[in-house]
Image (tube, rainbow, N blue to C red):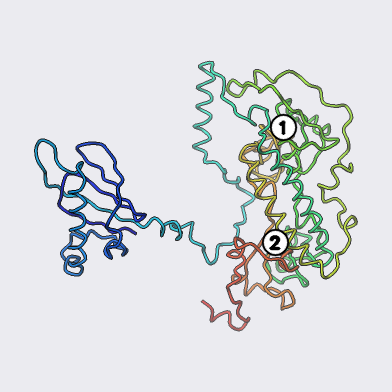
Amino acid sequence: MAARLSLTSSPSSITAAHGGTCHLVSPITTARVSIPSPLISHPVLNRNYSSTVSSPKYFALHIDQLKSAREDINELLKSHPILFGRGRGRRSKSITFLCTDQRQAQNQPTGKWRVHRQNVDLPPIQPKKKKKPYPIPLKQITQAARADKKLAQMGVEKPLLPPKNGLLVPKLVPVAHDVLDAWKIVIQGVSQLLHVIPVHACSECSEVYVGQAAHYIQDCQGATSAKRRNFHSWVKGSINDVLIPIDSYHLFDPFGPRVIHETRFAYDRIPALVELCIQAGVDIPGYPSRRRTVPIRMLGKKVIERGGSVEPPEQQCSPDAASMLEFDTYRTHERFSSPLELEVPGIAQKTIEAYERVKIGLKKLMKKYTVKACGYCSEVHVGPWGHNAKLCGEFKHQWRDGKHGWQDAIVDEVLPPNYVWHVEDPKGPPLRTALKRFYGKAPAVVELCLQAGAQIPAKYKPMMRVDIVVPDKEETHLAA
């Protein structure tokens, strides 16, 4: 908040900050001078007023404070030579003195999105008969395409910076290593916690529940849900229900020939997260990647120089090799045994911290390295262009001949959170449809670690609705 004083004085404007200096700008000379402000101690400047103090009502209420402030302002005007008129004498003009508290603005959040909200809406369910929204506005995409086309028509090469030109970004190589290290901790931690905390999955839809007894919420969208009155058909869940596997083609040269439908079996499928880290500078045995020393050159959408042709190694390992096994969720329930009861809270806390490291690292990598996602299905491709395999079977795939509708990916498409219902009391009664609006949600990994004894980050609490008291079934009609 600011206190605004409209006074009649010399032809200049003054802006004083609450940090101890005032800035004076004269219309005669364009000089800007910072001098100590003697007005900070005045109560009229320390109070939060947003109205102009020249109103009669304000003068009637605070006449003594304004007189004191006016006297100090006049002394300040006389003490500085810039504020005196030149040649024509002093002219009487209205000036504005604005005092703001900078320290208060730094400590207290302002704006709609900076305030910590008590509760947030649950994640919306995207309709299947509609394309996903673009993460980048379509207007910006078309403007960038027109600019590239204009440069190509003029014969000017497209300016490219790493990693868009095929070179590595040195400062992101440690980030890629940290993401893979944290990813191994997440896989191991979730696998061990699944021996202690049961996970249920619906055999007809994608619903997942973390807890001892499955819920009774009637929201199943499966093919035979009408026969069960929309109750779920629960089966025992696995790690793939908590960490949804998102695979991508491994490419030796992302800027080389595209993957087409006829050659799709010549490429290995590995987790998209791992493929992104490989292209960012991580070397995994059996999964080589070309490291360029000469940048590529592009004219519009055409690559005019790839830095020579390099053949990939002939022998490539299979997807179940030992080097990739530690980054995959394949048969983890056999590789990791059940932990001791005293070790469970520590494993849960370590897992949730590693999960946050993975998300933060992915966000940094995806700001530089291009990752594409289909706008209709869950397919993800790591590279500057999407592949041409005709594998999309979602909405209107016949119109596209089975090809994917590529667009820029977001973090939740590479690492899906898979939101589940939050259970306040795991040993209490199961969740019911009548109280559905009082329940919150959380990512499956977060809910699993919470029930195992971990401290949950504050950013998940508004969606989990931990501050809402769930009423009894008989009190539902009395709740607002």
Q: Looking at the rendering, which quadrant does residue 19 occupy?
A: bottom left
Seen at 41% across and 57% down, the residue is 103
Task: Name, please, the residue furthest toward the top.
Answer: 155
Q: Which mark is residue 446?
A: 2
Nearer-N-terminus badge (1/2): 1
Tell me the kind of residue under disc 1. Asn
For residue 215, above or below residue 409: below
Q: Is residue 83 left or right of residue 18?
A: left
Check disc 2: other Cα within 10 Å, few if <14, some if 14-19, many if 20+: many
Where is residue 90? Give x, y as percent: 11, 43
Secondary structure type for disc 2: helix
Q: Nearer the viewer, residue 249 or 450?
A: 450
For residue 405, above or below residue 37: above
Seen at 57% across and 44% down, the residue is 135
Residue behind mark 1:
388
Q: CA distance from mark 1 to mark 2?
A: 36 Å
